[in-house]
Image (tube, helix red, strand yellow):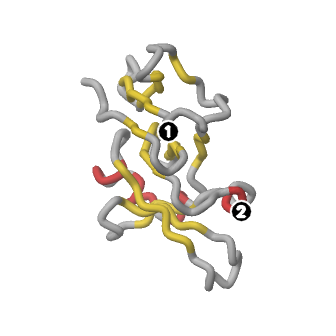
């Protein structure tokens, strides 16, 4: 049985987002680490007002909402704020079929007004509140 993934979020020096740190070892966790998935949210250019909303600030918990009736992609998964009142975009088309549907999603990095990076980790993972 694999050990539960536990991560701390550490603010970037420039304040654009967070880096990841393994809570057990204290080691930095890169975005390429196989235990995590960091995605660029697709379709944000259609919702620029959503991406700049504070509910998508780095460190915010997000909701992944499957859209099996989506006419363009039956595997589509929307990325919404935690309250599910505002949608930022979608999990990229090539990534969505690989997800189990119960992942934890956290806003990780804002790349200008039209970019958002989201951390996806397995269900049961622990992602600590952002360190200030």
Report the number of discs: 2
Percent x, y of residue 102: 52, 59
Distance from Cα at disc 2 to Cα at disc 1: 25 Å
- Mark 2 / mark 1, whichever is N-terminal: 2
63, 87: nearer the viewer: 63
Q: Quarter of the image containing the C terminus?
A: top left
SS state under label 1 = loop
Picture layout, residue 78 above or below residue 129: below
Percent x, y of residue 124: 45, 47
Q: Which residue is mark 1?
A: 111
Picture layout, residue 29 above or below residue 80: above
**Residue shown at 38%/17% (left/top)?**
13
Number of the front mark, 2 or 1: 2
The image's mark for residue 82 is none
54, 103: nearer the viewer: 103
Picture layout, residue 51 above or below residue 119: below
The image's mark for residue 97 is 2
**Residue shown at 63%/70% (left/top)?**
76
**Residue shown at 36%/26% (left/top)?**
15
Percent x, y of residue 106: 43, 46
In the drawing, does residue 68 fall left or right of residue 93? left
Picture layout, residue 50 above or below residue 118: below
Label 1 neighbour load within 10 Å: few <14, some 14-19, many 20+: few
Question: Farthest residue toward the front?
Answer: 1
Percent x, y of residue 61: 36, 50
**Residue shown at 44%/58% (left/top)?**
48
Question: Farthest residue toward the right?
Answer: 94
109, 59: nearer the viewer: 59
Quadrant of the rendered image containing residue 17: top left
Question: Farthest residue toward the left?
Answer: 132
């Amino acid at each position: 049985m694999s050990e539960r993934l536990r991560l701390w979020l550490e603010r970037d020096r420039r304040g654009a987002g967070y880096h990841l740190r393994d809570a057990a070892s204290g080691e930095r966790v890169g975005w390429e680490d196989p235990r995590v998935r960091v995605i660029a949210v697709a379709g944000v250019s259609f919702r620029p007002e959503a991406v700049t909303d504070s509910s998508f600030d780095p460190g915010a918990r997000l909701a992944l909402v499957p859209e099996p009736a989506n006419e363009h992609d039956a595997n589509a998964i929307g990325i919404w704020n935690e309250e599910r009142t505002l949608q930022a975009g979608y999990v990229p088309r090539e990534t969505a079929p690989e997800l189990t549907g119960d992942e934890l999603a956290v806003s990780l990095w804002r790349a200008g007004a039209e970019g958002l990076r989201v951390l996806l980790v397995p269900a049961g993972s622990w992602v600590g509140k952002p360190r200030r």
